[in-house]
Image: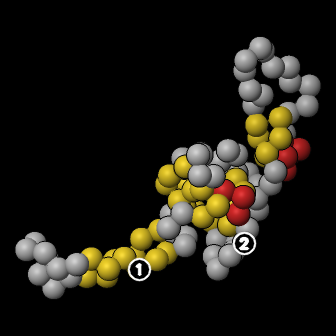
Amino acid sequence: MHVKKGDTVLVLSGNDKGRTGEVKEAMPRDGRVVVAGVNLRWRHRRPSQKNPKGERVQREASIHASNVRRVEAAAAKGSKAKAAKGEKKAKGDKPAKGATKSRKAE
């Protein structure tokens, strides 16, 4: 998966298109992520002894990982993450990834 917990992402499609937020949870098996402040849904809580009236609570629902793009601080908009040119990777290691826009500035 191209994003992980703690990454800042830009939502590419859906009702929250254009919003940015931090990934709170990544679910690689399902290919989904939970982004803070995005895809809010109402959760109805039933009455209990602790809360006899019951309540409605807004929670973030998951969205598909293909609908988000990682954003870096240097690049205000989202950019594709690519391995830097000329970097050799050791056997079993993954190449370092960085935003293409912020790498050009360096």
Instruction: Give the camera-side residue of 77 and 61.
Output: 61
Q: Residue furthest top?
A: 91
Q: What residue is shown at x 13% (from left), y 75% (from top)?
A: 48
Quadrant of the image containing the N terminus? top right
- Which amino acid type is marked by label 1? Trp
Q: Who is closer to the viewer here, 30 or 12? A: 30
The image quadrant where one finds the C terminus is: top right
Above/below status of 105 relative to 40: above
Q: Quadrant of residue 42?
A: bottom left
* Kind of residue at disc 2: Ser
Report the residue marked by disc 2: 13
Q: Is residue 13 visible?
A: yes
Circle 2: element type = loop
Q: Are marks 1 and 2 in contact (CB under 8 Å)?
A: no
From the top left corner, tell me how far across and down residue 94 is, in percent. Answer: 74, 26
- Residue situated furthest right in the rendering: 86
Q: Residues within 10 Å of mark 2 (few under 14, many from 20)?
A: some
Query: In the image, what residue occupies the spot 50% across and 52% down?
Result: 25
Drawn side of residue 56 relative to residue 74, left or right: left
Q: Residue furthest left?
A: 49
Residue 14, image x and y in percent? Answer: 68, 76
Q: Which residue is mark 1?
A: 42
Residue 8 in view in this figure: no
So how many labels did they put on this image? Answer: 2
- How many angstroms separate mark 1 from mark 2 (CA)? 21 Å
Compared across the picture, whether 62 is left or right of 82 comes to left
Q: Residue at x 22, y 78 (%)?
A: 46
Q: Which mark is residue 15?
A: none
Against 12, residue 26 (above or below) is above
